[in-house]
Amino acid sequence: MDFSDTQAEAAFRKEVRAWIDDHAPRHLAESLAGSGFGSTQTGEFDPLEEAKKWQKIKADNGWACLQWPREYGGRGATPIESVIWNQEEGVYSKLSGTFIIGQGMCAPTMMAYASEEHKRRYLPKLASGEDVWCQLFSEPQGGSDLAGLRTKAEKEGDQWRINGQKIWTSGAQYSDYGILITRSDPDVAKHRGLTMFFLDMRSPGIDIRPIKQANGDSGFNEVYFDNVLIPDHQRLGPVGDGWKVALTTLMNERLAIGGGIATGFPEIKELVDNLTIASGPAIDDPGVRSKLADWYAKSAGLKNTGARAISALSKGEVPGPENSIGKLVAGTMMQDIAKYALDLQGLAGLVTDPEIALSQARIQAMLMRSPAVRIEGGTDQILRNIISERVLGLPEDMRADKGLPFNKIPSGNSQGS
Amino acid sequence: MDFDFSNEDRMIQEQVRRYLQDQCQLNRHRSVLDGNETQALDVWQGLAAMGVQGTAISEDYGGVGAGYLPLCLAAQEIGAVLAPIPFSSSIYLAAEAISLFGSTAQKERFLTKLASGEIIATLALVEDHLEPSPNQLQTKFKNGVLSGSKMIVPHGMIANIAIVVASGDSGPQLVIADLTEVQRTPVQSVDPTLAAASLHFNGNSVEALGVAGNGWGQLQQLLHRAAVLFAFEQLGGAEQALNMAVAYAKERFAFGRPIGSFQALKHMMADMYVALKLAESNAYYAAWALENNAPDLNLAAATARVSATQAFQLCARDNIQIHGGMGFTWEFDCHLYYRRSNYLTLALGGLTVWENKLIEALPQAVA
Ligand SMILES: Cc1cc2nc3c(=O)[nH]c(=O)nc-3n(C[C@H](O)[C@H](O)[C@H](O)COP(=O)(O)OP(=O)(O)OC[C@H]3O[C@@H](n4cnc5c(N)ncnc54)[C@H](O)[C@@H]3O)c2cc1C
């Protein structure tokens, strides 16, 4: 066991540091550091443009998607090297948010199921940020129960005709491509009639409508498909095998989201270090100390669990369902931290005007974004189901739809077929 | 970077596990609980013969000199079976204190015998219901003799020597007391398998350990190091309690289905697993910090301690819940874990104390 760098790792770190020193967009450093959770502040500059610029410089110099093979735009680096890069990239990593879904979830799915020609054609531009990808999975009738999805795919010669609707698609409004899961056969059990594709988001018949979120932003969208055509060679995996393909994406989703996940600890620490409450400095208050210690222990636990996952990865082990704990712990923790931080300030805690609010209102942004962490990419409840069934081996839930053909499954009266 | 134990460390763990599975099933714990024996002394001797007590003790003093990493894993196995042996008191506390602060002569005299299992030792700190503090120590060390009482000393009934925290001429002072002539009275406790005693010193001659007046700083150093090893015992216990819960939930039926298919219980066990994972990862990091005397050892130790305490408390508590009425019987083993989890929580000062130590060790500005 060794938590310090080997000689080779130290040398690699030095190289990374030197390159970042020379190339990082320093003019953004201050705004980025002040970004509230779930947002990327770039001051007077356009966030998407700046994100793409930084990604492109990285890619041109071999610092994008470090673990991917070189022929797909990566560096062929080891998991540990990639961790070192992430540690050193620091505040500039906030610019990568736009690419997480594409690089973290769509790409692994493409690598596992796309043809060699497609991989060489699409992955390098995904690595360099020239193309942004989105994940078209959730539907009004298929969220936690993803396999309840209804978007129809019908084969016509060597192409597929798509009709239906996706919802909650993050980044669809600025995406170039997407991976899409569809129902190709409604007459078989629900997990069996699914087929996966990737498609050009500018295909005729696609209509993207932003949804305003509870926190006022518009990160996700409704995406309507009206007779959209996809060539058969853009199918990922066999017809009817879409569920298996989707599991590849979802497993990577939990790694990508659960990896160096934000917990809110630095924010609460900064606040209580500088705040005075009725009893004196907040950091001297026994109640504050107790909560702070608990949160520190949890965030350290996540960090160290991540480190162990990297070790396992370096030894060639496959990341398992145990990685579901990251988002499960961090989501609630962030929400609790935000609430407590506000509570310490009384009514003044409500203020979101960055000129008046403490910590530039980052905590209020956290308060309003944290509920989504507990929903996106698998709700807290679904993650607990996964841990109890797939890690602990407990029996599956009793299911009302077991063995039924998809078109015979009860769907409630809210939006039934 | 490599965040896992080596194969050699794992082999030592495996040997300890196999030995304990053979010799120290929970029926040994029960036999001590029911008062049929004070401790499982044959197990204590058996482990000593394998060199487990001496794992981290230097070869110069009869130990194996294999360092703290394998000792941490051995602690985990001892914790898993709730071994009723004076291992934590003797090794994580007393042997550690002597290794850290003892003279060469003291190390030769005591460490060799601790490594061989010939003597049992403990730490005598607590005097009353207050959290111990350097200014309130009533046990006095003067002119080489000790007077005063220690209220609860784990393994005090069977220890040959104790490291006693006393008040000396120039401040707190650690001393080594031979307990042969010392008056002891048994103390009942939540965990009756500790052979706990009150010790009454009445002018017994003792020898100083470490620098005069530095006792409190030394004690803190000792407690932080021991916290890492205690955390591994807690992990072992927590994991076993979770395993028990999962096994029972798969077998027991209600409403025509296994209770393990009820989401309320599944989610409870998922939370137990999460607490355990976090604690495990923090303990791994702390093990490394202990072995390497890392600059952030105090923070790592307090973090491991807080997480491990939370995990074992949660797993032991909810294991009872998942067993229903059976869980509240003397006959079922749930209460053994519940009892032990409370001992291990309080052994070095409770959760609040360690939360405070964690905050004290936190760097001023976290980036
Ligand atoms: C900010 C944000 C971004 C997103 N981005 C994307 C994206 O880019 N692409 C995409 O495809 N999707 C995306 N999603 C969708 C997300 O994956 C779903 O919202 C999520 O899986 C939950 O599905 P649902 O909204 O249909 O809720 P439902 O499934 O209707 O859940 C409602 C409630 O029921 C509970 N529940 C459901 N089933 C069970 C069960 N078996 N056991 C116990 N409780 C249960 C849930 O936990 C929840 O509390 C995003 C969501 C958010 C909030």
Image (spheres, coloured by chain):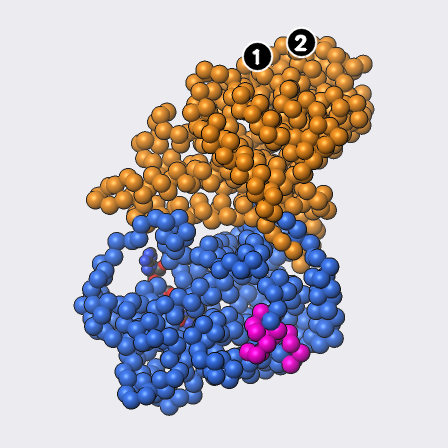
Chain colours: A blue, B orange
Q: Which mark is residue B272?
A: none
Q: Which mark is residue B185?
A: 1
* Horizontal and vertical percent position of residue B207: 76, 18
Q: Which residue is outermost to the left?
A: A408
Task: Name the quadrant of the C terminus of chain A.
Answer: bottom left
Q: Which chain is disc 2 placed on? A: B
Q: At 58% across and 23% down in the image, what residue appears?
A: B45
Residue B347 vs residue A236, the one in the foreground = A236
* Residue under label 2: B181
Give the overall secondary structure of the magenta segment: loop
Disc 2 versus disc 1: nearer the observer: 2
Which secondary structure, mark 1? strand
> Residue B123, can we see it?
no
Q: Which image quadrant is residue A37 in?
A: bottom right
* Horizontal and vertical percent position of residue A141: 29, 70
Magenta span of residues: A60-75
Amino acid identity at mark 1: Thr
Q: Which chain is disc 1 placed on? A: B
Residue A206: say if magenta.
Answer: no
Residue B251 vs residue A388, the one in the foreground = B251
Is residue A305 toward the left or the right of residue A216 in the image?
Answer: right
Q: At 66% across and 75% down in the image, what residue appears?
A: A28
* Horizontal and vertical percent position of residue A297: 57, 48
Is residue A327 toward the left or the right of residue A264 in the image?
Answer: left
Q: Which image quadrant is residue A136 in?
A: bottom left
Which secondary structure, mark 2? loop
Query: Could you classify mark 2 by the number of other residues whose Cα lies within 10 Å: few (under 14), some (14-19), or many (20 or more)?
Result: few
